[in-house]
Image: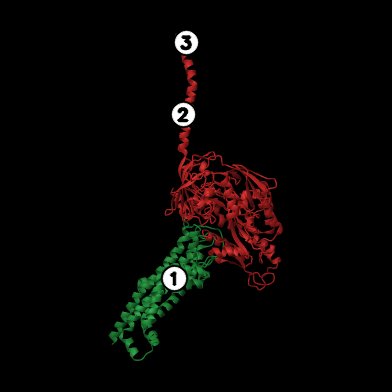
Chain colours: A green, B red
Amino acid sequence: MNRQVKAGMTILAVILFVAVFAPVLSPHDPYELGIPYQIPSSEHILGTNDVGQDILSELFYGARVSLTIGIVSALVVTVIGTTLGILAGYYGGKVDRIISQLTNVAMALPSLPLTIVLVAFMEANLRNLIIAICITSWTSTVRIVRSRVMQIRELPFVKLETTMGASSVYIMIRHILPNLGEIVFVRAVMEVANAMLTEASLSFLGLGVLGQKSWGSILHYAFYRNGIINGYYWWYLPPIFCISFSVLGFMLLGYYGKKDIKKKHKKNRKEKISYA
Amino acid sequence: MKKKLMALLLAVSMVASLPTAALASTESTETEMAEKTAEKHVELLKIGTTRAADAFNIMTEEGSYGKMNYNSFCAAPYIQRGQDGVLEPFIMTDWEIADDQTSLVATFATDQGITWHDGEPFTIDDVIFSLEYMINVKQSSYITGMTTVEKIDDKTVKINFDGPKAFGVLNSMAKFTYIYPKHIWEGIEDYKAYTGEDAMIGCGPYKVTDIDQDAQVVTYEKVADTYLGREIMVDKVQVRSYDSHDSLVMALKNGEIDAMYDYSNSLDSSMQPSITGVEGLDAGMSTNTGNFQLVFGFNVAPTNDLEFRKAVSKALDYELLAATIGGADGEIAGTGIVSSAVQGFNPDLPKNAQDVEAAKAILDEAGYADTNGDGLREMPDGSEMDVLVTPQYNSTRSALYARIAEILIQNLADVGVKASLDEESVRNSDYCTEFRKSGQYELYIGYTSPGVATFDSAFMYMTPNPANPWGTCNITEFNEKYDALVSSGSQEEYNAILQELQVMAADNVIGIGLCWDKAYFPYRTDKIGGWINFTGFGAINAETWYSLYTK
């Protein structure tokens, strides 16, 4: 495991820990009202917001929403994208044309504006936010997976399996899917980061779940209640750092994890060859 | 002797030269004064607003042009309001209300050389046309009750009403209703759709000379050196439109503009620190005549129950509400709701005060008990209670409304009452309007603008009335008193009735004033002087054009 992956995993482990143990770690109830605009002190390490809520506690609880949306969205998007990509890449022909056209149309639509429109039309809750993010995020996974599957299906061992009469479903699950691990892993990790950024953008615009603590919503109030213009750095900087660090964590894991996996593959192959 | 003669001659010549010298001195003083006055004129006043430069129609109040007309600007109002909110003559120079309040005789400035901005003379026919157009075509809510207009002579008309409404209508139409040029608008029924260039022709002291919609800048120039006998001190006005108050404030701080104008939409109190202590900038603070308020829905339970309303009034954290809404200058509102800056304010009523234990006791006694042991109270009949908190839709202040709602929900939870936010109302203007009209709201967070506070009061939003049919208060005595307020015959009578209404509102907890805040309309003081900051409306007002001077 290289250093970058270790750094990424450390960041994500910290965020995950904070999210899971938010009720224990938070010094205050994040919804508890108090004295507004308090600067950082021993009582409130990151100060308070415009209604006197403790910003550190808001951040801890915000990690839960941001991570939940990020991870669930990434899972859904990866499953949909991988399934469609495999189907398009393996079957080709009419199936490929339909899925590719669908993907092209979806890719032509600007994702953030479309997500905003979807969120605006749906009832604002966690589930609908995830749905809106998923609807606009599956396309790139499909394209990448499809290209890779098209390469794999031409390999001799797949041809051999086909000749031996193995069913398509069997080949896709047993032989093609395991060979997509590296791509799927990278896409999944990157999708978490993308979904977290989209959630932050939506919440910043006031389209998140009102009253629910998320990093985007903390930024929303810091901006729209003039914390930035008044220089209340303790209000707007922490959520920016949290979003940036968690995205960095996923990026490190995605980019360098991919290299790590490649190295492992090469190593395994060499070992197999030497054993042979 | 020779010396004496010389002295005498000198003395005589000196005495003889005195008047000449005095005359010369007077002439030179006048010249200097004229020069100084000319020097003191403000050549260009740059005003920033968030209203777009997108509508130029004297018939509507839209865009920066429409809103600037509230300041007796391009369009000439019949009457205007002074600094203290009192009615002042403008193009309607005098008026006499009949004792029975069913008519008034008004005199107009048709003999003072005023012309329309296209050069046509302003006549009494324009006055009659304008009033009849408002009655028959626009059916303007400002003049509800005005029925007919009769010409008396070339300066005077008699205006008739369908009841004792003369003062009330005058009060309502001040600064918002204008004279229209008959030669342009005669025959045009769909005035909103009319987009001819002459739609912006008025007869006020300024006329539009340039519109740059790409840059969102509109330039106006004065029509003459004097208007209605007063010297116009600002030669040219530029109104620049900005996307938000943030960018407007930055432009003001940079000296790109001289003052902010946004009608009654003051800067949010949370921006106060960014405009305080800036060199050459006055925060333009004044007491807001308007106020944020909580309106109870009388059509639904539990807000139709006086005991529940009393409990809510005791449950709220007014200090936090004042700080959240009004910032450092926010003040806890009184139980009479109406702002202390409004004429007719009742100073005898106490301020709101939080008493959580009292709120709990009231709820216990009224039967709102936690019967299922989940920590939340149920309705007296045992059914689940979930009070809906509906904030008014406001595109620029949605964050503040959401915060107010959050405080209310948290405060109610502290006394065991479950309340939920009506999220759709925060995001959807149409939904908010329709829901409000349905009268099915429970706790409605709203705002009384300074204009409404001046001539209708915050109670307009609580009683069912022609101007605001969605009020749900069903206390007959209160509603009748409100009707008496809007048809009062004088400012004194209006003030007296308003005071009584505040007492009744406090006793019956018809609504709750959430904060008495300040209005902030900042302006630069380093180059221009003579600003008059109108309470609740700021330094750009009907007096600005005559009072400013270059420092």
* Earlier residue among tags 3 and 2: 3
Among all residues in the image, which is located at the extreme top?
Answer: B1
Q: Quadrant of residue B504?
A: bottom right
The answer to whether the residue labelled 3 contacts the one labelled 2, judged by CB atoms less than 8 Å apart, is: no
Q: Which residue is mark 1?
A: A195
In the image, what residue type sits under mark 3? Answer: Lys
Front label number (1 vs 2): 2
Q: Is residue A178 visible?
A: no
Q: Which residue is mark 2?
A: B28
Label of residue B4 in the image: 3
Q: Is residue B186 visible?
A: yes
Q: Secondary structure at mark 2?
A: helix
Asked if residue B313 lies left or right of residue B518, the reply is right
Percent position of residue A86, x then y: 38, 81
Same subunit, tags 3 and 1: no
Q: Which residue is more in the foreground, A57 or B318?
A: B318
Q: Secondary structure at mark 1?
A: helix
Percent position of residue A110, x then y: 41, 68
